[in-house]
Image (cartoon, rainbow, N blue to C red):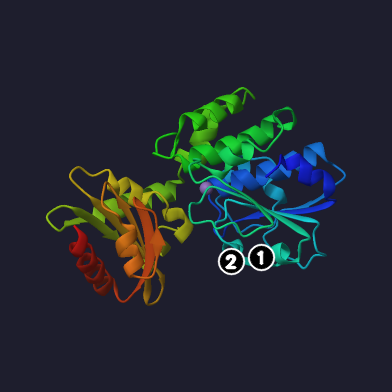
Amino acid sequence: MNQLDTYLEKASSIAISGHIRPDGDCVGSTLAVYNYITENYPEKEVFLPLGEFLEVFDVLKSSGNVDHSYPDKAPFDLFISLDCAAKDRLDKAQKYFEAASYTLCIDHHVSNKGFADENEIQPDASSTCEVLYGLLDPAKVSRDTAMCLYTGIIHDSGVFQYSCTSSHTMEVAGKLMDYDFDFPKLIDDTFHVKTFEQNRIMGKALDDSRLYLDGRVILSTLSAQDLEDYHVQAKHLDGIVSQMRFTEGVLVSVFAYPSDEKTFKVSFRSNGPDVSVPACAFGGGGHVRAAGCSVEGTRDEVVAKILAELEKDL
Ligand SMILES: [Mn+2]
């Protein structure tokens, strides 16, 4: 793929989107492109439809301009897909992709087969924001756009901790730091800070957790009543299963909460074993160290099913 400006210059209307249930990299990369275009090409029509995301990303410029209602629109000249591994993961924004005259896909998911007219997929990159930075003209990147890109990198690399972090990741992050924003505050505000309710429900989940399979598995569940009592929604439960993984001697952490009356949403984190195996056994998927699935049944049935599946591999 050429530099992004090559495609922007030829288009007068541009739509940008990313994957369903957007995370930090998805929000950061889509807002970075939105700001890059509106600041450098003010004459262009730009539209950013995307799913609802956590309030912590409201610190990023133009987060208030994101459309969550997916109205019908005339076909766009250009559609840019970011951080999205497959077309159907665009969710309701897929209709703009289908109608667009030309499409670009910028991503880092290893499973991405390249569903657009032109694709820039770098599976070794920490984040889509790291890939995206290489396609932008640094002279046209503002402080606000740099903050969006930095946010995506820190979220997908776990603040430069996960194995996806490379020396190139650090080089890009270093260049972004030169735009002179308050990076410790950005990391705190978007990555570490939890609401009072989020910390309380995490405390509840940790307090209720139990060890299984000779201490190799730590597991905790919450009920619909718990979510109601603690005034939280499913999107506020991020981080619980990751915290559980930091338990001495544990190989796998498991966290489950009800997504409807007879289904539990289950998340796995691992200190070694491939947890995409049990997740796939239930029709889910993911990565070696982080995976998820949905399991039907009561709380006790779901726990029994998961432990039986984990016992095969551990
Ligand atoms: Mn990503």
On-image quarter of the N terminus: top right
Residue topped by disc 1? 94
Identify which residue is drawn at 80% across, 59% down: 76
Rendering coords of residue 189 (x, y %) = 52, 37
Image quadrant of residue 162? top left
Identify which residue is drawn at 39% across, 54% down: 287
Q: Earlier in the sequence, mark 1 or mark 2?
A: 2
Image quadrant of residue 58? top right
Residue topped by disc 2? 88
> As displayed, is residue 6 above or below residue 180?
below
Q: Are marks 1 and 2 in contact (CB under 8 Å)?
A: yes
Lateral position of residue 21 relative to residue 68, left or right: left
Label 2: how many residues lie within 10 Å, few (<14), some (14-19) or many (20+)?
A: few
Lateral position of residue 239 relative to residue 245, left or right: right
The answer to whether residue 229 is visible is no
> As displayed, is residue 133 above or below residue 241?
above
> For the residue marked with disc 2, what is the amino acid?
Asp
Query: Which mark identifies residue 207?
Result: none
On-image quarter of the C terminus: bottom left
Rendering coords of residue 297 (x, y %) = 31, 77
Which element is circle 2 on? helix
Query: What is the spatial separation of the Cα atoms under label 1 and label 2, in whole angstroms?
Result: 7 Å
> For the residue marked with disc 1, what is the amino acid?
Gln
Looking at the image, the residue that sits furthest to the left is 214
